Amino acid sequence: MGTQLTAADVEQLKGALKDLSFLQYLSAAETEALLAGFDKAEMKKGELLIEQGTIGSIFYIVASGSVGVYRKRAFLDKQIARLGPGSYFGEMALLSRQPRSATVACAADGVVFTLLRATFRNVLLGNPHLAEMINRTAAKRREELVDIEISERITRSRQTPGTPA
């Protein structure tokens, strides 16, 4: 998907990573392994990075620009989040090996750093503190998706009385 990192890219990635709270738990060797595993990809407004329902193999960190997170609906996709620099996404499918739970599209031109499943699992999930933090974030996001689904069903049932939600 992306290109190898230059020295300037590594510095930009370090800048993006410094805002991620889980990095305090990385050893120097883990940090180096993590940095070596990243690629860089430019993203253009409207470009799909993740499509709901597909199997995931990439973890993303937004370095610049922003992305919208959408849930597919029968006739219209609903934006459920907007993520900017320092935000990460794509971890849920890498943790569970389940299909992607949302679509992520570029909302403003920018750069994402990408990490393949193997490196993600070896470095991040090999560290007990990181694994716990990432699993907690994934669980929280799954709960938020369930809450959104329930809320939408209630709203639909109120709009069409007498029809099952």
Image: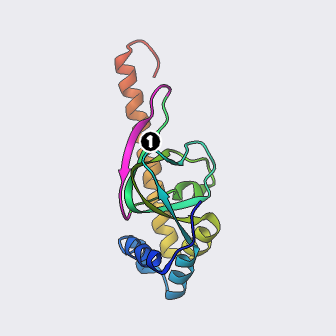
Helix, strand or loop status at disc 1 = strand
Q: Amino acid at mark 1?
A: Tyr
Up-down relation of residue 32 to residue 58 (above or below): below
- Identify residue for label 1: 70
Q: Which residues are magenta?
A: 74-86
Q: Along the line of sight, which residue is nearer the eye, 71 or 112?
A: 112
Residue 162 spot, x, y in % from top left? 41, 12
Question: How was the colour assigned to the protein in this rendering?
Answer: rainbow
Up-down relation of residue 59 to residue 11 (above or below): above
Q: Residue at x 45, y 34 (%)?
A: 77
Up-down relation of residue 41 to residue 34 (above or below): above
Instruction: Classify the position of the N terminus by image quarter.
Output: bottom right
Q: Residue at x 38, y 62 (%)?
A: 64
Q: Is residue 58 left or right of residue 149?
A: right
Give the quadrant of residue 155. Answer: top left
Q: Residues within 10 Å of mark 1 (few under 14, many from 20)?
A: many
Q: Residue at x 53, y 55 (%)?
A: 92
